């Protein structure tokens, strides 16, 4: 028998400048040790950077360092198969500088640790705490607050929730919840009352506006993958429309709705996409996959989608494709993309501090993991440039030629000494912080912290060894705490020049066991809280130290503190220098030598200028590929001289292309114009396996025998129609577009069946193997 103590960091602070809600997550037992005031030199190039000693900062920071208790602590004691728990809730009214015990507001109730806290949309001030109630009771219990935790009221639920309560993105009074009996519940008054809107629900998601999407099975079996129905309601459950059948899973990305649908081939699934919330569908021109494989939306916006398609067999990798603006037609972007089947880890990272930039890892032929980066939304992937102030490690065959490799989710899953994922913020332009190693591949040795201030084009080693880090003041301030598994922490490091020079500050005389850094989301704040605990004889004393850097950087930045910076610049003599995705962007950025604060009202200032089109504004089209280190698209040998056919909206079409298509969202004009067109062959084909005839509006109470008879007749007509089209129109095979990644036979009109091989199952916690990964 073992007692388990834990913590949930729930920061409910009404900020004077913007009343908003923030949530911090505990990072586990991360320990650190360092002391004293030191100055750390960091060079960007071989030229020495002089870091000036800063006098007096220890006194200012110490005067504005505050020790408080955590917001929510939990204690669980398993006894005879039953867990007994206790929670204490605290509230801070000054951004963590002090807390008051408000446990009485939740009647000293134990709060669930797995999904007990549901934070409302930004600025709503709403939070829901889900109590741990025995499953033998009639229903669960929640505590609601709509005033940033000043008051809570209790609501007894008519069900036991099985997942975290879902807020509507625009109206925080509208909530969805799924019960342990797979019943979907809706509340229109912030959880005060609840209405059962549908039974036998397996997965539910909010869509755009008031739309709700969910999968269901008439027999209540959510394990019957491939036999589910996808339904939509636009009026909170008064009416429903079945928009898909034979569903294996579904996902949302940008304005795209995707559904994985079973085909008539054994165990194969085809991906479908809809741009009108499921009213019409098209089969996505991607490989079909078996039940042991998966699709995954890596990133999506209104212009395009990054889609990972798992390779057959237990390979641990797949292929990244990028879509057109309809999400239907795809081009190969990256082969051997690392994405494990056992744990679902991928290193794919959207660099939010500069548009068009993504970083991920590939699994090389020799089994090593290597990092690559793209600056043009997947048009071309390159190794990361070697930092000038770092030497190649033992993985490098040539000690003078190697590259930087970034540690991300895969390294963490392999229990490497990597405490944090790569970090970037939209308002900290060009800034990226990440753990990495320098060589021919990712190393298992202890990583260092590397920083890029130009969106990933160049890097330098900023800190030796692993650290926890966060960005404050829109990039004007970086703070870090060293990660050490064998000692406690009492030192924080900070930099005011994007990681070149570092200062150390002892924030406490008594070291604490470190659990994480917390700051206001959005990287605008100048406050940071260091969370941890002190081990006592029979319990743990949770503490937090909050540092206010506004008392250190007291001067607001003026115009003279900023310079103009051209993004994606590599050659100032080139008239197209800085052109990326069709336009240049100049940003107003803080000088590294300026000692001032951007402030909470800082807004990113950029000046876009449209560019003439070049080959760099185009992706390779279907049947074409780019050779390594080349911008020219070459025709695939086995498709030379043959038509590229595909099925779109039920019509057979031929793609007429010279090998290029413009990158979705590219804004260039004039210059190089490479047009493509699609010719209608005036022949029918099957581009939709979702049985459109049966997708109809329905009401929850309308299940009379007459309607059931009509549906049966429609199904019979549908089956006969599909058989007729397959046999007499499409030659018994479904038409799909040939994509350059597959070496298909030129005369074939159908995609080759993929080999099925045993792949380890996805984690049980995942909604499904095709679940999109968007935050």
Image (spheres, grey):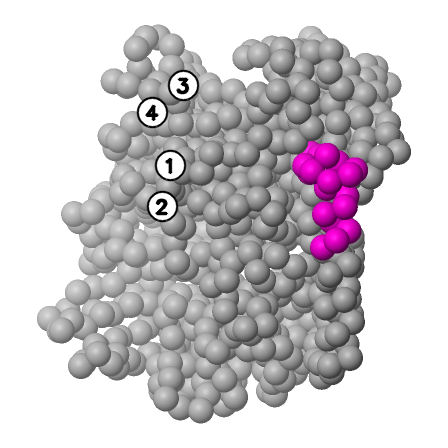
Q: Earlier in the sequence, mark 2 or mark 3?
A: 3
Within-10-Å neighbours for mark 4: few <14, some 14–19, many 20+: some
Give the residue number, with chain letter if any, for mark 1. Answer: 314
Identify the mark at residue 578; answer none if there is no mark: none
Identify the mark at residue 760; answer none if there is no mark: 2
In this view, the mark in front (3 or 4): 4
Q: Nearer the viewer, residue 30 or 79?
A: 79
Please name the predominant secondary structure of the magenta segment in the image.
Answer: helix
| Percent position of residue 284, x then y | 67, 40
Residue at 38%, 20% (x, y): give it: 365
Q: Earlier in the sequence, mark 1 or mark 4?
A: 1
Q: Is residue 282 visible?
A: no
Real-space Cα distance between discs 1 and 4?
Answer: 16 Å
The quadrant holding residue 174 is bottom right
Real-space Cα distance between discs 4 and 2?
Answer: 21 Å
Real-space Cα distance between discs 1 and 3?
Answer: 28 Å
Give the residue number, with chain letter if any, for mark 4. Answer: 368
Are the residues tagged 2 and 1 within 8 Å (C-beta)? yes
Q: Earlier in the sequence, mark 1 or mark 3?
A: 1
Q: Which residues are magenta?
A: 719-736
Real-space Cα distance between discs 2 and 1?
Answer: 7 Å
Mark 4, secondary structure of its residue: loop
Give the residue number, with chain letter if any, for mark 3. Answer: 403
Q: Nearer the viewer, residue 580 or 725?
A: 725
In this view, the mark in front (4 or 2): 2
Residue at 28%, 34% (x, y): give it: 465
């Amino acid at each position: 028998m073992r007692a388990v103590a834990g913590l949930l960091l729930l920061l409910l602070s009404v900020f004077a400048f913007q009343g908003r809600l923030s949530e911090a997550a505990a990072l586990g037992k991360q320990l650190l040790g360092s002391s004293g005031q030191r100055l750390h030199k960091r060079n960007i190039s071989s030229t020495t950077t002089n870091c000036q000693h800063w006098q007096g900062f220890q006194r200012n920071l110490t005067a504005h360092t505050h020790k408080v208790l955590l917001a929510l602590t939990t204690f669980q004691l398993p006894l005879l198969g039953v867990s007994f728990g206790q929670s204490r809730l605290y509230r801070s009214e000054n951004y963590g500088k002090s807390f008051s015990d408000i446990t009485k507001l939740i009647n000293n109730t134990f709060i669930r640790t797995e999904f007990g806290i549901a934070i409302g949309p930004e600025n709503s001030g709403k939070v829901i705490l889900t109590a741990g109630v025995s499953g033998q009771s009639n229903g669960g219990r929640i505590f609601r607050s709509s005033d940033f935790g000043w008051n809570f009221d209790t609501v007894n639920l008519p069900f036991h929730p099985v997942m975290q309560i879902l807020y509507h993105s625009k109206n925080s009074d509208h909530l969805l919840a799924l019960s342990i009996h797979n019943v979907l519940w809706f509340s229109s008054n912030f959880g005060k009352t609840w209405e059962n809107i549908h039974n036998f629900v397996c997965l539910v998601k909010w869509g755009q506006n008031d739309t709700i999407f969910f999968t269901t099975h008439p027999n209540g079996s959510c394990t019957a993958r491939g036999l589910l129905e996808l339904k939509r309601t636009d009026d909170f459950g008064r009416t429903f429309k079945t928009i898909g059948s034979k569903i294996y899973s579904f996902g949302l990305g940008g304005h795209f709705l995707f559904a994985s649908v079973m085909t008539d081939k054994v165990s194969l699934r085809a991906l479908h996409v809809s741009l009108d919330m499921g009213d019409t569908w098209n089969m996505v021109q991607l490989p079909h996959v078996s039940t042991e494989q998966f699709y995954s939306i890596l990133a999506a916006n209104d212009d395009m989608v990054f889609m990972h398609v798992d390779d057959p067999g237990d390979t641990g990798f797949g292929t990244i494709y990028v879509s057109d603006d309809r999400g239907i037609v795809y081009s190969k972007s990256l082969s051997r993309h690392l994405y494990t089947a056992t744990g679902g880890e991928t290193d794919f990272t959207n660099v939010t501090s500069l548009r068009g930039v993504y970083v991920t890892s590939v699994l090389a032929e020799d089994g090593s993991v290597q990092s690559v980066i793209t600056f043009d939304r997947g048009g071309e992937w390159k190794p990361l440039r070697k930092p000038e102030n770092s030497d190649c490690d033992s993985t490098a065959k040539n000690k003078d030629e190697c590259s930087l490799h970034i540690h991300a989710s895969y390294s963490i899953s392999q229990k490497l000494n990597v405490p944090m994922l790569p970090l970037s913020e939209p308002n900290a332009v060009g800034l990226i912080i990440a753990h990495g190693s320098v060589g021919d591949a990712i190393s298992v040795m202890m990583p260092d912290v590397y920083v890029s201030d130009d969106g990933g084009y160049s890097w330098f080693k900023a800190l030796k060894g692993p650290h926890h880090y966060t960005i404050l003041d829109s990039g004007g301030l970086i703070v870090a705490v060293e990660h050490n598994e064998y000692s406690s922490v009492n030192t924080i490091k900070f930099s005011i020049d994007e990681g070149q020079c570092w200062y150390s500050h002892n924030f406490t005389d008594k070291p604490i066991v470190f659990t994480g850094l917390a700051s206001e989301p959005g990287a605008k704040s100048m406050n940071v809280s260091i969370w941890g605990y002190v081990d006592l004889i029979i319990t743990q004393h949770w503490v937090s130290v909050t540092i206010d850097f506004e008392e250190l950087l007291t001067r607001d930045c003026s115009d003279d503190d900023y310079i103009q910076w051209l993004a994606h610049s590599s050659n100032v003599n080139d008239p197209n220098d800085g052109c990326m995705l069709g336009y240049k962007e100049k940003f107003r950025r803080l000088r590294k030598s300026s000692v001032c604060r951007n402030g909470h009202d800082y807004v990113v200032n950029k000046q876009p200028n449209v560019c003439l089109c070049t080959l760099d504004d185009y992706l390779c089209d279907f049947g074409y590929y780019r050779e390594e280190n080349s911008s020219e698209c070459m025709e695939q040998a086995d498709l030379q001289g043959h038509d590229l056919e595909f099925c779109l909206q039920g019509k057979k079409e031929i793609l007429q292309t010279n090998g290029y298509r413009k990158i979705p969202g590219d804004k260039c004009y004039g210059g190089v114009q490479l047009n493509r067109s699609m010719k209608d062959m005036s022949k029918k084909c099957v581009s939709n396996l979702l049985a459109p005839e049966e997708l109809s509006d329905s009401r929850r109470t309308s299940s009379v025998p007459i309607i059931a008879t009509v549906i049966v007749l429609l199904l019979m007509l549908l089956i006969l129609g599909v058989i007729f089209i397959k046999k007499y129109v499409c030659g018994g095979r479904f038409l799909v577009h040939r994509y350059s990644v597959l070496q298909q036979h030129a005369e074939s009109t159908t995609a080759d069946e993929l080999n099925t091989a045993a792949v380890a199952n996805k984690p049980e916690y995942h909604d499904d193997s095709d679940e999109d990964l968007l935050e």
